[in-house]
């Protein structure tokens, strides 16, 4: 009798543990935006699943996953760059999943390519454009309306840009390599180096401020950095935004380069079903607005639009975006880094 009671207690304990596990999802996130709090809260209200979140930088998350191995508690990974998502896939940190909801919602070029079993390793949930800002007092939009023109001798001594090895630039340069081919892309990078106003340094906001101050005439930035300045409560920030023009390059050819923030199910996820539910929720219209608008980005889910005054002012009539698979951009990382070393792009 005692043995049966112990067995029953063990079964109840196991069932309780399983139930508790069913009601949580462990999230490692490189996103740090206040609007995401409402996003996660709404997910819990809708599903009853509690989110346990760890916030860290992309590189730190990837390093942590590698160190934890099979013991990792992570169920969902959110990263903010295609090159980083690609690296996580190549390093075997994600597990491919099948989800009709996600496959129907997220365009094929904004997610990883299917594996042998058709599973997708990661999904893009918001996009940002890699745009060109310029000094309206000395240049015209037509002077910088393509990425190719960044290497034009007419811009000698005018370009400000962050480190070539930063993931945002690795993704842009990977896209250019996909469009141009390696030989032409390397010549292009050599031309940009020849046109630098100063050694690469700082972040994208620093590049915009460099144009506004007259230190340089042209800079490359992710669109959301400019949108932040436009929407800032600080008058000095808004003045910086007003002093520069913005171009969404290559509207007559392959379109403006897009990067993504995206998510994946961790390879050793203990709450796999809940992880998939969270990713599916992130593709819903409600979540897409929180996810994208929280960082002044565009949603990826088909048919979803964000009401963002800065983005609307930046590009009132919309823009043509490139359509190459974003995963292919990440695949050029090593090749691009080698080219950067050869041309002396710091």
Image: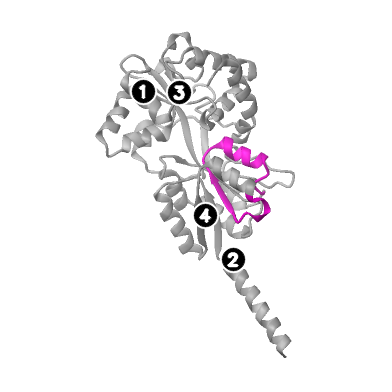
Q: Which residue is mark 1?
A: 210
Question: Pointer 3 and pointer 1: residues touching (CB < 8 Å)?
Answer: no
Q: Nearer the viewer, residue 248 or 65?
A: 65
Q: Which mark is residue 161?
A: 3
How far from the left and from the top, in percent, is residue 174? Answer: 59, 27
Alpha carbons under labels 1 and 2: distance apart? 51 Å
| Dot label at residue 22 | 2
Toward the viewer: 1 or 103? 1
How far separated are the C-alphas under marks 1 and 4?
40 Å
The relative height of residue 257 versus residue 17 in the rendered view (above or below) is: above
Q: Residue at x 32, y 38 (%)?
A: 231
Q: Nearer the viewer, mark 3 or mark 2?
A: 3
Q: Is residue 41 above or below residue 11?
A: above
Distance, label 2 to label 4, CA atoms, is 16 Å
Name the residue that disc number 4 marks. Answer: 281
Q: Is residue 91 magenta?
A: yes
Quadrant housing residue 161: top left
Neighbourhood count class around disc 3 (C-alpha, 10 Å): few under 14, some 14–19, many 20 upward:
many
Q: Magenta residues?
A: 68-95
Query: Callout 1: helix, strand or loop?
Result: helix
Crowding at label 2, few (<14), some or many (≥20) Cα neighbours within 10 Å? some
Mark closest to the chain's N terminus, 1 or 4? 1
Q: Residue at x 59, y 40 (%)?
A: 85
Asked if residue 95 lies left or right of residue 252, the reply is right
- What distance separates the C-alpha of mark 3 from that of mark 1? 10 Å
- Residue 125 lies, in percent from the top left, at 52, 44
Locate residue 55 relative to residue 177 in the image: left or right: left
Q: Secondary structure at mark 3?
A: loop
Query: Quadrant location of residue 202?
Result: top left
Mark 3 or mark 1, which has the lower sequence index?
3
Helix, strand, or loop for circle 4?
Answer: helix
């Amino acid at each position: 009798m005692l043995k049966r009671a112990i067995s029953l207690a063990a079964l109840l304990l196991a069932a309780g543990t399983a139930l508790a596990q069913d009601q949580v999802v462990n999230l490692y996130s490189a996103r740090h935006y206040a609007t995401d709090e409402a996003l996660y809260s709404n997910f819990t209200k809708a599903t009853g699943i509690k989110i346990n979140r760890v916030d860290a930088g992309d590189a730190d998350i990837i390093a942590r996953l590698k160190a934890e191995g099979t013991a990792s508690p992570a169920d969902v990974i959110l990263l903010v760059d295609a090159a980083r998502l690609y690296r996580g896939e190549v390093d075997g940190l994600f597990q491919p999943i099948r989800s009709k909801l996600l496959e129907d919602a997220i365009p094929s070029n904004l997610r990883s390519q299917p594996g042998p079993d058709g599973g997708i390793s990661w999904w893009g949930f918001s996009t940002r454009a890699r745009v060109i800002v310029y000094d309206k007092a000395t240049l015209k939009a037509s002077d910088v309306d393509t990425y190719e023109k960044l290497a034009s001798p007419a811009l000698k001594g005018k370009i400000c840009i962050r480190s070539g090895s930063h993931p945002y630039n690795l993704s842009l340069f990977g896209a250019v390599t996909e469009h141009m081919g390696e030989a032409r892309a390397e010549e292009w990078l050599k031309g940009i180096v020849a046109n630098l106003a100063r050694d690469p340094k700082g972040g994208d906001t620093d590049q915009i401020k460099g144009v506004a101050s007259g230190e340089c005439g042209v800079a490359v930035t992710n669109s959301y950095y400019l949108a932040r300045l436009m929407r800032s409560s600080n008058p000095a920030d808004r003045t910086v935004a007003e002093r520069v023009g913005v171009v969404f390059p290559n509207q007559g050819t392959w379109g403006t380069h897009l990067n993504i923030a995206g998510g994946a199910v961790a390879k050793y996820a203990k709450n796999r079903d809940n992880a998939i539910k969270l990713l599916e929720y992130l593709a819903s219209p409600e979540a897409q607005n929180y996810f994208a608008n929280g960082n002044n980005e565009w949603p990826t889910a088909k048919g979803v639009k964000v009401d963002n005054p800065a983005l609307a002012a930046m590009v009132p009539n919309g823009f043509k975006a490139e359509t190459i698979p974003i995963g292919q951009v990440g695949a050029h990382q090593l090749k691009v880094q080698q080219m950067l070393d050869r041309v002396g792009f710091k």
